[in-house]
């Protein structure tokens, strides 16, 4: 059973400021000099903007798209960048689906992924992360494949250190993710987290335009 919660964070900016203190403490003095903060779009970018401001680090974005079963929409996985999808093999076996049965869905979501990346970055290239510390920020890690897909994509870019930072995390997902990131920074870990919204007083949608505006701001600046 998912635990009863009251809002722990006023909104994503509040969560980002609290997470920034935890991230700064972990990275130590001169934390932002070799760091790149990457927000998991869309909601994670609003949290990541506060972390980037605190570290005086550049802000970028990663897009991960869910993959659903043809016909019934059952969630089966996710993909990010050009990496192979992260798939729920057990669910696929239960539905008697082969990987090639998802080819059309994968192709569709990859097109949408690239469209959103271009929209968010406004034709700017992705920030280089090779040899640097990457802080991947999301507004919450629920049980599912989206965060692992984003981690896989960023790990493939060759960072020196990959940190996943989130205000709230599902404990099962956290156990899996700790094996593929260098460190997981989570302000609250809980069991059976299927929705992030109840942990926020204000969890309104972050629009594509808001993501693009946040990404255009110089390091160290967020909206007033």
Image (cartoon, rainbow, N blue to C red):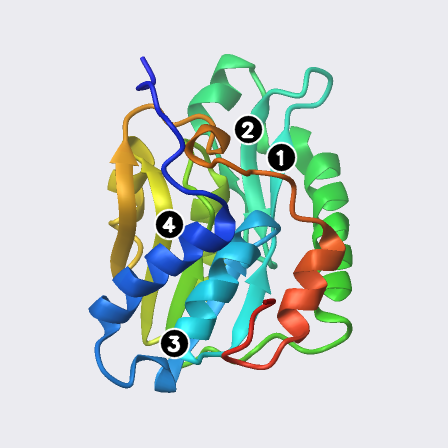
For the residues bearing labels 2 and 1, Cβ distance under 8 angstroms:
yes
Mark 3 lies on a secondary structure that is helix
Q: Which is closer to the viewer, label 4 or label 3?
A: 3
In the image, residue 12 sits, relative to residue 102, either above or below, namely: below
Q: Earlier in the sequence, mark 3 or mark 1?
A: 3
Question: Dot 4: within a 10 Å radius of its alpha carbon, few (fewer than 14), some, or many (20 or more) residues?
Answer: many
At x 45% / y 46%, what residue is drawn?
147
For the residues bearing labels 4 and 2, Cβ distance under 8 angstroms:
no
Mark 1 lies on a secondary structure that is strand
Kindly report the distance in space between the C-alpha atoms of the residues bearing marks 2 and 1: 6 Å
For the residues bearing labels 4 and 1, Cβ distance under 8 angstroms:
no
Q: Which is closer to the viewer, label 3 or label 1?
A: 3
Kindly report the distance in space between the C-alpha atoms of the residues bearing marks 3 and 1: 34 Å
Q: Which is closer to the viewer, label 3 or label 2?
A: 3
Residue wearing tag 3: 55
Residue 158 visible to an observer of this rendering: no
Kindly report the distance in space between the C-alpha atoms of the residues bearing marks 3 and 2: 36 Å
Report x, y in % for residue 156. 45, 66
Residue wearing tag 1: 67
Q: Earlier in the sequence, mark 4 or mark 3?
A: 3
């Amino acid at each position: 059973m998912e635990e009863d919660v009251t809002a722990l964070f006023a909104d994503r900016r509040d969560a980002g400021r609290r997470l920034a203190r935890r991230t700064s403490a972990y990275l130590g003095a001169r934390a932002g000099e070799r760091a790149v903060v990457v927000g998991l779009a869309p909601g994670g970018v609003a949290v990541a903007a506060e972390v980037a401001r605190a570290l005086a680090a550049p802000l970028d974005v990663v897009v991960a798209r869910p993959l659903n079963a043809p016909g019934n929409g059952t969630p089966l996985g996710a993909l990010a960048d050009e990496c192979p999808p992260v798939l729920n093999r057990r669910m696929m076996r239960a539905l008697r689906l082969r990987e090639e049965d998802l080819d059309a869905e994968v192709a569709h979501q990859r097109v949408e992924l690239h469209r959103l990346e271009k929209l968010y970055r406004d034709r700017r290239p992705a920030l280089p992360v090779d040899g640097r510390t990457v802080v991947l920020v999301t507004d919450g890690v629920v049980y599912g494949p989206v965060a692992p897909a984003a981690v896989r994509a960023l790990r493939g870019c060759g960072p020196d250190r990959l940190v996943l930072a989130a205000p709230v995390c599902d404990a099962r997902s956290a156990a899996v993710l700790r094996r593929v990131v260098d460190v997981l920074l989570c302000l609250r870990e809980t069991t059976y987290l299927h929705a992030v919204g109840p942990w926020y007083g204000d969890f309104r949608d972050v629009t594509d335009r808001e993501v693009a505006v946040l990404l255009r701001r110089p390091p160290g600046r967020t909206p007033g």
